[in-house]
Image: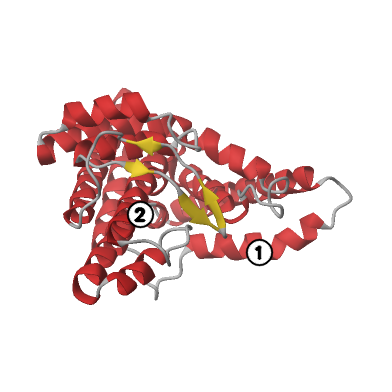
């Protein structure tokens, strides 16, 4: 993507995300990526190599393939007309950003709890978390929704914009394939521990810098929204590494400090109890208003990240 077109393409993408979210009627590349993973997995598993090598080969092929296809589409659309190229890049970036849909899904959990009670809240939160929900009380349902907002701020906003700034829409699309692979095969169970190992590690590497970059943006948003920027930053520094993931703890800890609530603790995944460290130890429990507060914090952070990236892109075009 030419440097001078990046700020406008990103602006259009953010506007589209705020207006449309993730409508089911719109064909979405992430769904295509998921179908590609499902169809290719059996073939790669049948190769005469170890599962770890087979999974690595599939991951490399899919990530490189998505980048190449996206790059060719951008080049061809630019060759037809620069305006078409701009719109194509904006739509690609729009499909990589998910701030609106993340907020909608979390708020739906809060509304289900408020209007229909705990059973409805469990059903709603089951749509956005991997843990078992049938034993969660209202506090745990609320905490699960807030944790999802905090963690997915990086996957759904910060990282795509970060990679778009580095390499345009094609690199952002390649990142989304990395993220999709991790969500589908990056598990530590018997089926995927070896086959999905490379995908999981690649996702960790891809999110390493964006996860840490998210902290000052969350802290600034927390200061603007609730005057708790210092606390958000302090808890992120203290508890950012208190997570099984090398990256997810940073945004969760910053949110914990900003919202004044603890996160983490034990949960049930696929019938197995998983003990997770408590993030924000000493803070209060999750309460119903925290869901909307978390969404407001996430959207404010997203706006700050977008503005910083657009300004960086503009500065780059002026230097170039």
Q: Residue at x 41, y 52 (%)?
A: 96
Please name whichever residue, 204 or 245, is drawn nearer the observer in this view of the structure. Answer: 245
Instruction: Identify the residue at image location x=38%, y=57%.
Output: 91
Task: For the N terminus, give its image quadrant.
Answer: top left
- Judged by depth in the image, the label closer to the viewer, 2 or 1, is 2
Position of residue 201 in the picture relative to residue 257 (left or right): right
Question: Relative to 121, is 277 above or below?
Answer: above
Residue nearest the observer in this picture, 133 or 162: 133
**Does 196 sit above or below residue 31?**
above
Q: Mark 2 sits on what residue?
A: 144
Image side of residue 184 versus residue 227, left or right: right
Q: Residues within 10 Å of mark 2 (few under 14, many from 20)?
A: many
Q: Which residue was labeled with disc 1? A: 38
Residue 82 image position (x, y, % from top left) = 38, 51
Q: Residue furthest right?
A: 48
Q: State the residue at coordinates (16%, 55%).
A: 289
Residue at disc 2, secondary structure: helix
Residue 204: x and y in percent read 53, 36
Quarter of the view holding residue 223: top left
Q: Position of residue 4 (x, y in %)?
A: 32, 37
């Amino acid at each position: 993507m030419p440097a001078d077109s990046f700020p406008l393409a990103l602006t259009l993408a953010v506007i589209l995300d705020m207006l449309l979210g993730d409508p089911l009627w719109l064909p979405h590349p992430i769904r295509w990526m998921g179908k590609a993973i499902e169809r290719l997995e059996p073939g790669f598993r049948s190769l005469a190599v170890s599962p770890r090598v087979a999974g690595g080969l599939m991951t490399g092929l899919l990530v490189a393939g998505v980048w190449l296809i996206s790059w060719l589409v951008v080049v061809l659309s630019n060759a037809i007309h620069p305006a078409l190229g701009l719109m194509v890049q904006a739509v690609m970036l729009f499909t990589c950003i998910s701030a609106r849909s993340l907020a909608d899904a979390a708020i739906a959990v809060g509304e289900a709890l408020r209007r229909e009670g705990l059973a409805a809240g469990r059903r709603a939160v089951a749509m956005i978390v991997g843990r078992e929900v049938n034993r969660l009380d209202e506090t745990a349902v609320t905490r699960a929704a807030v944790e999802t907002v905090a963690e997915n701020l990086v996957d759904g906003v910060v990282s795509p914009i970060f990679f778009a700034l580095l390499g345009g829409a094609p690199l952002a699309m390649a990142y989304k394939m990395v993220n999709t692979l991790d969500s589908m095969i990056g598990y530590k169970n018997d089926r995927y521990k070896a086959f999905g190992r490379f995908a999981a590690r690649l996702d960790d590497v891809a999110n390493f810098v964006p996860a840490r970059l998210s902290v000052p943006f969350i802290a600034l948003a927390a200061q603007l929204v609730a005057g708790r920027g210092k606390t958000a930053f302090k808890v992120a520094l203290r508890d950012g590494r208190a997570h099984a993931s090398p990256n997810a703890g940073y945004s969760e800890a910053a949110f914990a400090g900003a919202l004044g609530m603890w996160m983490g603790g034990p949960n049930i995944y696929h019938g197995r109890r998983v003990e997770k460290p408590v993030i924000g130890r000493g803070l209060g429990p999750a309460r119903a208003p925290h869901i909307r507060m978390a969404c407001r914090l996430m959207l404010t952070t997203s706006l700050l990240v977008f503005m910083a990236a657009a300004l960086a892109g503009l500065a780059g075009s002026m230097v170039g």
